[in-house]
Amino acid sequence: MNARPHRVTISDVARAANTGKTSVSRYLNGEQHLLSEDLRGRIQRAIASLNYHPSQMARGLRRGRTRLIGLIIADITNPYSVHILSSIEAACREQGFTLLVCNTNNEVDQELHYLDLLRSYQVEGIVVNAVGMREEGLNRLQQSALPMVLIDRKIPNFACDVVGLDNLQATSRATEHLIKQGFEAILFLSEPIGAVNTRRERLYAFRQALSLHPTIAAENSEIPLHDSARLDAALHAFHARWGGVRKAIISANGALTLQIARSLRRLGVQWGSDIGLLGFDELEWAELAGVGISTVKQPTQEIGHAAVKQVIRRIEGSEEPVRELKFAGELIIRGSTAR
């Protein structure tokens, strides 16, 4: 069994350069003008020959800054989460921060675990795509006083900056599109709503839009993401119940849209000809699936960048009132909702 390789330290560099640790520290901390040209050269050659990499964590802690931002994300398999993660990482890099990512897999206990973990790493702030904090988690957040921004999902009874989609605007526009296309029965499908405000807001906007059109049948159902039997039953019943009219489905997120597409294929129902289909979140395969699937595209790049900028403002001491930043969605129309 091989022994663990020796980790090169600042003492090793000092020894190889025939100098003291103080001189090496000055070199690493940008104070090279205090050193002679000969000493700078010796330290540079020692660092290169030993392949020395200073501990950014240790250096940050000595300065009182870690330059770390934590991200707690509800479900990293969700297409929306992937795009948000990418935009947040890019924004952190641009601002000179490193991102630590924690995926909770939609489990509240994992959310609490990662919150404690990120605090132990002394992150300077966190961005949270929350599952649903309980009282214990809220108490920890309030006691930590850690700069925080929420993305997409709010935490009940917790005052915090929030960045996300304007759900009312986006859902209203999507529903009105289906109305204009002549659909006479519309089913809004989501995962169990629970405390997830985005699902609740989208359902509310759907109902509000259709309350102005009493002749159009408005239905909604909550189906767990991977319960294919319940999903098949709900779609079969909806399709059969409105067999003689134009009907459509609105899916509350991209992960559910994929499951709906699979279910319709199993049932032998074609989107576009037999039934309309419109889903939240732009999916890479949406334009390639059959006649194409209409989507509500979220501005994930803008949302991610805005969240990072806001948490950095809080890190830097901003005491401005808590605010909610809402971004408009873009409706992309394809064959699944054509006349």
Image (cartoon, rainbow, N blue to C red):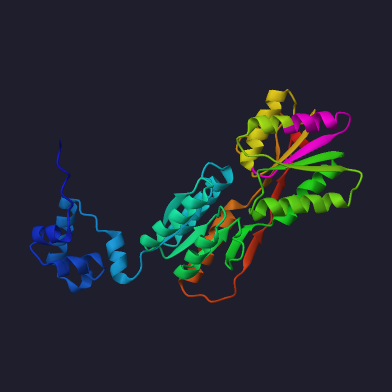
Q: Residue sitting at 72 percent across and 51 percent down?
A: 202
The answer to whether residue 97 is seen in the rendering is no
State the residue in front, 213 or 143. 143
| Image quadrant containing the C terminus | top right
Q: Residue furthest bottom?
A: 319
* Image side of residue 170 versus residue 106, left or right: right
> Which corner quadrant of the image does residue 328 belong to?
bottom right
* Image side of residue 169 versus residue 160, left or right: right
Q: Position of residue 212 (x, y in %)?
A: 88, 52
Q: Residue sitting at 13 percent across and 61 percent down?
A: 11
Numbered circles on residues, count: 0
- As drawn, 333 above or below 274: below
Say whether residue 60 is magenta: no
Q: Residue furthest right?
A: 215
State the residue in front, 76 or 35. 76
Q: Residue sitting at 9 percent across and 60 percent down?
A: 15
Q: Position of residue 271 (x, y in %)?
A: 75, 30
| Image quadrant containing the N terminus | top left
> Which corner quadrant of the image does residue 67 belong to?
bottom left
Q: Position of residue 97 (x, y in %)?
A: 41, 60
The answer to whether residue 337 is seen in the rendering is yes
Say whether residue 242 is magenta: yes
Range of the magenta residues? Answer: 234-253
Q: Residue sitting at 45 percent across and 62 percent down?
A: 95
> Which corner quadrant of the image does residue 325 belong to?
bottom right
State the residue in front, 82 or 130. 130
Q: Position of residue 249 (x, y in %)?
A: 76, 38
